[in-house]
Amino acid sequence: MEIHYTSDFIRSLRGLPKETQRLAARQEEIFRKDPNDTRLHTKALKGRLKGFYSFRVTRNYRALYAWKETDVALFYEIGDRQYIYLSR
């Protein structure tokens, strides 16, 4: 599994609390092994975000991504679930 990151994703990740960054790294490890692992609570998004997916980092934080190729994901954004879907 290959993962690419947008500059927005990297900037947002660096702005998160250290504990949330640690949890994000753990969730990314799970994602690399199996993007459909139930611990991620992965969801296909709808409406204007059709083609994007999200997975849970914590109860309140989500990572937004899309598939570039079968085994290549592009991580777009990470942040509070109340705001992350508004950024795209």
Image (spheres, rainbow, N blue to C red):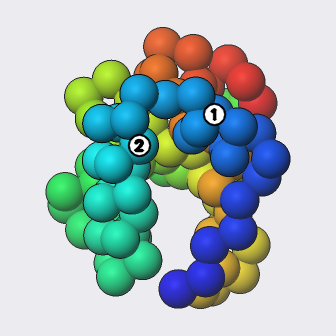
- Mark 1 burial class by Cα count in 10 Å: few <14, some 14-19, many 20+: some
The residue carrying mark 1 is 12
In the picture, which quadrant includes the C terminus? Answer: top right
Residue 40 falls in image quadrant:
bottom left
Q: Residue furthest right?
A: 7
Task: Give the residue displayed 50% in from the left and 44% down from the top.
Answer: 63
Of the residues shown, which amino acid type is indicated by label 2? Gln
- Element marked by disc 1: helix
- Residue shown at 57%/15% (left/top)? 83
Mark positioned earlier in the residue sequence (1 or 2): 1
Q: Position of residue 14 (x, y in %)?
A: 59, 38
**Residue 47 at x, y = what percent?**
65, 31
Query: Considering only vertical position in the picture, is 58 above or below 41?
Result: above
Percent across and percent down for residue 77 are: 64, 40
Which residue, given by chain and number where applicable, does mark 2 sit on?
21
Q: Name the residue furthest top.
A: 82
Picture layout, residue 47 above or below residue 75: above
